[in-house]
Amino acid sequence: MIYREASEVYWDNERKSFKAPAPRKWSYADWFHHIVKVTHSCSIKLVLVNSTQWVNVPSEVKAGICAK
């Protein structure tokens, strides 16, 4: 159902994750929050938890994601 939102967010079945295009005008944090908003509109609740594993995510990107 995500593809019906026309939001550039889609499910990557091979990676088992939601994906969005590489940031152009938006930051990675902006895209992250956009994915959370779009999935929420499809009754999917994505949340960060204390045990979230951050792999190859620069500290400034992580800070931007966690700040909102």
Image: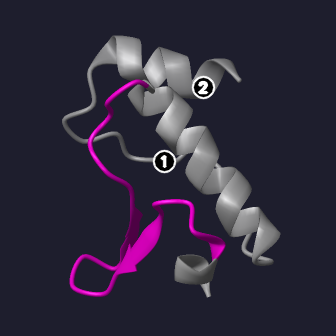
Of residues 3 and 50, the one nearer the viewer is: 3
Label 2 crowd (10 A; few <14 / some 14-19 / many >=20): few
Instruction: Decide if residue 51 is on the left or right side of residue 19.
Output: right
Read off the residue under disc 2: 66
Query: What amino acid is labelled 1 in the image?
Result: Thr
Mark closer to the observer (1, 2): 2
Label 1 crowd (10 A; few <14 / some 14-19 / many >=20): few
**Residue 46 on the magenta segment:** no
| Residue 21 x, y percent position in the rendering | 31, 51
Query: What amino acid is labelled 2 in the image?
Result: Cys
Q: Quadrant of residue 58?
A: top left
| Residue 24 x, y percent position in the rendering | 32, 30
Instruction: Decide if residue 44 is on the left or right side of residue 17.
Output: right
Q: Which residues are magenta?
A: 5-25
Read off the residue under disc 1: 52
Image position of 21 with respect to 12: above or below: above
Query: Do we see residue 45 in this rendering?
Result: yes
Q: For the residue labelled by badge 1, is the local secondary structure a helix, a strand or a loop?
A: loop
Q: Residue at x 46, y 60 (%)?
A: 8
